[in-house]
Amino acid sequence: MDLGPPKQRLVFAALAVDLGHSVSIETLVDRVWDDEPPGDARGALYTYLTRLRRVLAAARTDAATPITVGRGHAGYVLSADPDRFDLQRLRRLAERAYGLPADHPDRSRLLREALDLWAGDPLNGLPGGWAERVREGLRQDLVQVLIAWADSEIERGHPGRVADRLAATLHRDPLAEPVVQRRMRALALSGRRAESLELYARTRALLAEELGIDPGADLQELHRGILRGELHPAVRAETPPPADPVPPAAPRRPPSPGAPGCQLPADLPDHVGCEPEISRALSALQPGSQRLSGTAGPVVILSGPGGVGKTAVSVRLGYLLRECYPDGQIFVSLGDRHGDSSDALDRALRALGVPSVRRLRTVEDKLGEYRSALSGRRILLVLDSARHAGQVRPLVPGGTGSALIVSSRVRMTTIPGAECIEVPLLDDAGSRTLLERIVGAERSAAEPEAVAGLIRMCAGLPLALRIVGARIAARPHRRIAHLADRMRDESNRLDEMTADGLAVRVSVAVSYAGLDNPARRTFRLLGLLGVTDFSSRMATGLIGGPHDVVEEQLEQLADARLVTVVTEPTGQSLRYRMHDLVRLFAYEQAQLHPEDELRFGSFRELAAAA
C-alpha cells in the first residue's frame, strides 16, 4: 500500500504507534514536525489526514478488516485489526512468552516467532527526531526480546542456536553488552571457548576506543568464569531471572554529599481524591519500574485542565517518594513564562545547585552539566505547569537512578516511556469532603442545601471549591447560604470565586490566551449558547464556515482543555462538553465583542425559522 510522501507516511506512523487509541492534534504536530512546526501545521496535518483516508478507503477489500482514520477523544485514532501490524503481533507474542517459565518450550517458540516478524528498520525512510526516537526505542525492545529468547534457548540446552543468531545482531551493534554476554556464554557452552574469549577482547577494545570505558561488571565476571573453566559443554548455563520481575524497592541510604535536599512546596494536608491516580503514579515511579526497556529513569505526566489539582498531586507524590530518591526532590515551576528547553534547563540546574549557570552558552553545555549533576544520584525532579513537550524532553533522566514528574494542561504523549495520567475532577462526595475539611464538618452539616448548591456550582473543580471554602472560613459570622445565594446569579459567579490571589477566572484566562483568534471567536460564541453540551453540527451552525474548519477549532479548544470530547452512546459521532465555569468565562468574553452578539442573534433567527 502506497501511503504517499514521507510526511504523510509520518502522520500514519504517528497514529499507528498508538493503534486504537486517540492521538491529540498537539501530539501529532509534535511527532511530525518535532519542535519546529510550520505556521499552518494544523492545516497541513488535516490535509495529510484527508489524503490518508482516501488511500485507506481505496485499499479496502472484502477479505481484510479495513484500516480507518477517524476522530477520537480530543484527536484522531487509527483503527484496524492489530494482526495487520507486525509490531502489534510482535508485542503480543512477547507478552505471552514472558508469562511462561524460562525453560518452557512454548516460551522459546513464541519469542522466535516474534523475532521472525522483524524485517528491516522500523519507520524506514521517515524523517525527524520523533521517528528516530521511536526507531531507537523499537530497536531496544527487539534487543530485549532477543535476550529473553537467548536465555530461554540456553536454559533448554541449545546454545549453538543462540551463538549463530546473535552474531548478526552484534555485527550491527557490537557494543550491546547484554547481547555480547549471551553470545559469549553460548559460545562457551557450545565448546567454542576461544571464540568466546576473542569476542570479549574485541568488545573490551571497542569500548575503550569508542567510549573510554571498561566492560560492565557482569561481562567481566563472565569472562573470569570462562577463563577459570566454569562454563563448558557439560555444564548447563545458570537459570536466567524470571521475565519482567517486579523491581525491588530502592534500598534506603543517606543522601550523597552535596545533595540539593527537599525543595518541594508544602503538601496540602486537606487534599482529597485521586487515590487511583496516585497509586498508579507511585507504581510507575519506583526505581527500576520503567514501562519500556532502556536506561532512562521513570517519568510520569500528570495532565488535566487548569485548577484540577495537578500541582497538588505532583507535590504529594514527591513527599511519598522521598525515601526512594534520598538525594533530593527538586521542584521547578515553568508556568510563569513561555520558556524553551534551554530556560527549563537553566531552572533545573540552579535548583540542583550547579554554580554559574550563565557561563553555559549552549543547550549542549547545559545538558552535559545536568546529566553530570544527576549522575550517581537518586533525585526526583518535579516540573510544574510545563507548556509543551519540548520543555520536558531534555530533562528526562538519562540514568535509572532518578525520576521525573511533570504537570501540564497538555497531554504529553510524545515523551518516550512516560506514564500519562489524567487528573480528574472531584465527584460530589469528594467535593463535599474537601469543603468539610476547609470550613469544618459541623458547620457544613448545619446547612446541607447551601453546601449542595455550592458543590453543584463548582462542578467538581478543586480550585473553585478551595476558593469558596476559604471565603466561608474567613467569615464565620456569615451563613453558608449567604455566599450560595450570591453565586446563584451567573453574572456574579466568577467575581465571587476569588480569594487571596486565587481566581478561577485567571486560571481559565491562561488557556484562552493560548488560542489563535479564530479559536477564541469560536470559544466566545459557544459561551453564548447557554448550554454545556453541544454537537459539532450545532457549533458549525453557530460559528459559520466549513464544518471541517469548525471541527479543527473545536479540537484546538479541546487541546487547551476548554472543552472535552464526549462520545455519543451510539459511538457514531462526537459531542463536546464545556465546564460550567468555563462557559461563564466564555460568555464574559463574548460581551466584550459586539460582533459575537450579532452572529449569535443571526443563529437564533435561523434556528427559529428552521
Image (spheres, grey):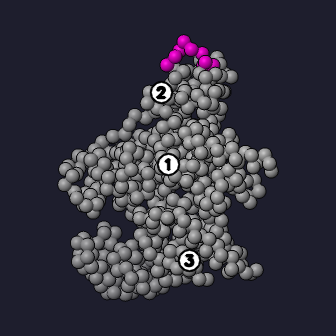
Q: Is residue 130 above or below residue 397?
A: below
Q: Amino acid at mark 2?
A: Ala
> Can residue 417 be seen at all in this image of the molecule?
no
Q: Is residue 418 above or below residue 608?
A: below
Q: Quadrant of the N terminus?
A: bottom right
Mark closer to the observer (1, 2): 2
Q: Residue at x 69, y 44 (%)?
A: 601
- Residue stretch in magenta: 474-482
The reply to whether dot 3 and dot 1 touch (C-beta < 8 Å) is: no
Q: Is residue 16 above or below residue 183?
A: above
Q: Residue at x 60, y 30 (%)?
A: 491
Secondary structure category for the residue under label 2: strand
Mark 3 highlights which residue? 114
Taking the image as shown, residue 417 lies to the left or right of residue 228, namely right
Taking the image as shown, residue 360 lies to the left or right of residue 514, namely left
Q: Residue at x 27, y 47 (%)?
A: 350
